[in-house]
Image (tube, helix red, strand yellow):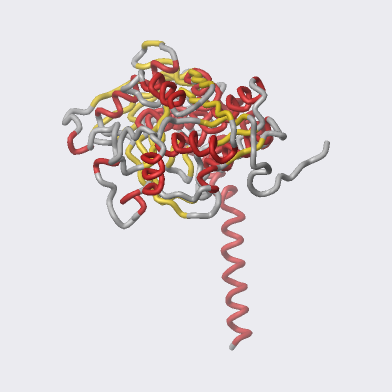
Amino acid sequence: MEIIITTLGPKKSHYEKILLLYSGGLDTSCMLKWLQDKYKAKIYTFTADLGQEFADKSRFKEIEEKAYKLGAVKHFTLDLKEKFLKEYIFPTIKANGLYQGIYPLSTAVGRPLIMIEGVKIAKQENIPAIAHGCTGKGNDQIRFNVTAKAHALDVEILMPMIEWNMGRDEEMKYALEHGIPISNQNKKYSTDENLFGRSAECDILEHPEIEPPEDAREWTTAPESAPDTPEYIMINFEEGVPVGLNGEKMSAVKLIGQLHDIGCKHGVGRIEHMEDRAIGLKSRETYEVPAAIMLIKAHKDLEKYVCTKHENSFKAHVDQRWTELAYEGLWVDPLRGALEAFINEINKKVTGTVKVKLFKGSAEVVARESPYGLYDLNLATYDTTSTFDQKLSYGFIPIWGMQSELGFKLKKIALNNLKEKKE
């Protein structure tokens, strides 16, 4: 097979058709008009429903109407919530996917799915180019572009945010000049939402020495204003997948939605940290991820309970690498699939119930039970009824520590010899 390395930037100055990944916000709305003028193209638009806009289910109809008003010849809205949960979020939970130990992959794992579906639409409609609203500084450009090229080598990727080099003020001016409706002229932050989380960037958030202001959060109650009484929830897992809440089995979408509401009420899932982007920049990131935090904490605790220390130790390395691949836009890399095979094997026994205490912004695992738990009360108890033969320690400890003791002694001898030579 011939491998083609694409040149930098767009290959053509004219396209008959372009598919735009359209959110309905200021950036992509400006793009819809700009692409028509720049490339003399018919613009098709695609919006993916990944569970964003929890409180406003009519939002997708508004986006469609806006796209047509701005000149789109055809608009697609796809409800991808179930696919997103089962094929992207559940694997993330099984992998305890916390990038740099902090960020639950929410936006990161939504991007490959959006582009895969976008490529399908492009093929269906014979569209040669796909445009998206990513800048040249972030991770999303990698997630979109690599996924697109893996699924359709001949597709062209257009990145207007790089080509036009407009700041937000210039975009606002462009919108006014071209009759583009601006839904919220005072919006300070660039945000992204889906079922698993919300991110916010820009404005004062670009200054890591300043605490994020309260208006950067939209979902969660401030912890100091959260209920003064803790709430306990029981999350039920089967083979690593959350299947029920408080003993009631329910669909994946309903389960995530209920956890979201409960977590928001208690101020759970507020995260801000300095993140290492794939391209090398440090970035101050702020997230609201209530359901994600609860599910990953609960899953990790249950997994640890049913696995041996050797499985737990090795899986931590596998999880980290899997998470890095997903975060850095390499969802299509064969290594992810190979790592996932191990992750799925481990999760075959991650079945049981985890009790989580929610209080003033914290989600703390306080109890767990599983038919596969490796804890044995008869062995572990300090009562005299314990079946563990403590006399075995007489032989175990000398063997366990033998090499370390020898190494320590020989190191001291070597250091003394070196000291004598110098003297």
Asked if 216 appears above or below 367 in the picture, the reply is: below
Question: Within the image, what quadrant is residue 297 found in?
Answer: top left
Measured as percent of width and height from the top left, residue 288 is found at 35, 36
Question: Within the image, what quadrant is residue 222 found in?
Answer: top left
Measured as percent of width and height from the top left, residue 357 is found at 29, 29
Measured as percent of width and height from the top left, residue 267 is found at 26, 34
Measuring 61% from the left and 60% from the top, which residue is drawn there?
A: 406
Measuring 54% from the left and 35% from the top, which residue is drawn there?
A: 36
Between 283 and 173, the residue placed more toward the observer is 173
Q: Quadrant of the N terminus?
A: top right
Residue at the extreme right of the image, as rendered = 1
Q: Quadrant of the C terminus?
A: bottom right
Q: Is residue 18 left or right of residue 56?
A: right
Measuring 64% from the left and 44% from the top, which residue is drawn there?
A: 10
Q: Is residue 38 visible?
A: yes
Residue at the extreme bottom of the image, as rendered = 423
Measuring 41% from the left and 43% from the top, which residue is drawn there?
A: 174
Between 133 and 66, the residue placed more toward the observer is 66
Number of marks: 0
Asked if 29 appears above or below 368 in the picture, the reply is: below
Q: Is residue 387 visible?
A: no
Between 4 and 205, the residue placed more toward the observer is 4
Measured as percent of width and height from the top left, residue 145 is found at 61, 39
Q: Is residue 398 left or right of residue 12?
A: left
